[in-house]
Structures are given as structure tokens and as C-alpha cells.
Image (cartoon, rainbow, N blue to C red):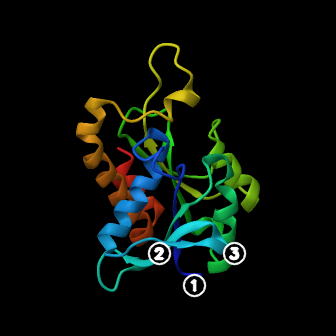
Amino acid sequence: MSDAWLVVGLGNPGPTYAGTRHNAGAMVVDLLAERAGVALKSQRKHRADVAEVRLGGVPGARAVLAKPHTYMNESGGPVALLADFYKITPDRLLVVHDELDLPFGTVRLKLGGGDNGHNGLRSVRARIGTGDYCRLRFGIGRPPGRMDPAAFVLKPFSTAEKREIDLEVDRAADAAEAVVVDGLTYAQNHYNG
């Protein structure tokens, strides 16, 4: 399946964390699965919810959508297992994650780069052995005042953000789909504005 993409939405498992800022990546992958008309299925051996899909219509581009069952700081294990199983190289890995350094709802795509203190990205780098994979950064903004960023990412979106979140997740899903169907450069030119 080497011509496929692996699209991983980072987050924390369970209902306690659903709807929190740290689960923005998982929300995007959930929407991609919904668009493809599939349900993510739990795969114990990969420690993730997974679906093989075609994105972008018929015949569509092949992708494996995944949400790790692990907590954010252990995301790399399932990512490495899935990449190995589906024979997907880092240049065809797209990790969708929350980003403190971007205003709420901002989408930025890039290849490689540092982890910027993001424990999920640090774990992925450690387990796949490189940081040279594609990232879709979903802006969640900075915490107010002196709030600890670690506490901020685990809080639900604000009332104002909740009014916009569906629209922003939809746009991020469009950007992820563009990467898979048309390539990173095309997607960057259309969504990094």
C-alpha cells in the first residue's frame, strides 16, 4: 500500500478529552472518516482506530486514517506500527495536531521541522526516527494570562470557539484531503494563506 498516505489525528483517548483543544487533530480525522462514509475501527495490534479510505471522490486517493488509542505523549508507538504495517514512508505521513503558536482556527501545512515542545510530535519523531514528515498544524491560540499551556490544551474550546469549531475543522479536513489528493505544495499554496 506504499502509494497511500497515513493521516494521523493526534489527541487523547476517551470521553474525558473529547472536545478539548489537544484533540483538534483527532476531530479532523473523525470528519475525514465521516466524509468517506466509514467508521474508524479499533485495531488492538496497532493501538489505534483505523480506516482505509479513498479521499477526493471517485476513484480518489488512497489513505489510511488513524487515531491512536494512546495518550498524546505516546502517539509515536501507534504511528510507527501503522507506518510499518502499511509500508508508508515518512514523506507520506501527515500528522494533524493542535498548535499553540497559531491563532485559533489557523491552518498551516509544512514538511519537517522541530517539535516546538509538542509531546505528540516528539513521540512520533522518536518512534519513526525522523522529523521529516508532513504536519497539519491546527491553531488553538495561546493560553490567557499566566495559565499553564499544559492545562490550556486539556480544556474544552471556549464558547466563542465552539461556535466556529465545526467550520474550522471542516477547513482543516479540506487541507488534509488536498495534501493526499494533490500533494503538499498544492495544499500549502491553497491553505497556508
- Label 2 CA crowd tier, 10 Å (few <14, some 14–19, many 20+): some
Task: Determine which quarter of the picture holds residue 62.
Answer: bottom left
Image: 119 above or below 100:
below
| Closest to the observer, 144 or 190 | 144
Q: Picture coordinates of residue 184 (x, y %)? A: 47, 61
Residue 16 rendering spot, x and y as whole percentages: 47, 44
**Residue 25 in picture, x, y percent from top left:** 46, 51
Q: Secondary structure at mark 2?
A: strand
Question: Is 148 placed above or below 130 here?
Answer: above
Q: Identify the disc placed on residue 47.
A: none
Mark 2 or mark 3, earlier in chain: 2
Mark 1 residue crowding within 10 angstroms, few (<14) / some (14–19) / many (20+): few
Q: Are marks 2 and 3 in contact (CB under 8 Å)?
A: no
Q: How far separated are the C-alphas under marks 3 and 1?
A: 11 Å
Amino acid type at mark 1: Met
> Disc 2 marks which residue?
51
Q: Earlier in the sequence, mark 3 or mark 1?
A: 1
Residue 1 numbered tag: 1
> Mark 3 is on which residue type?
Asp
Q: Amino acid at mark 2?
A: Ala
Mark pair 2, 1: CA separation: 13 Å
Q: Residue at x 51, y 48 (%)?
A: 97
Q: Which residue is identified by label 3?
A: 84
At a point 50% along the width and 35% down the height, the residue shown is 154
Marks 2,1: beta carbons within 8 A = no
Pair 2/1: label in front: 2
| Residue 63 seen | no
- At x 35%, y 44%, the residue is 193
Q: Helix or strand or loop: what does disc 1 sit on?
A: loop
Q: Residue furthest left?
A: 163
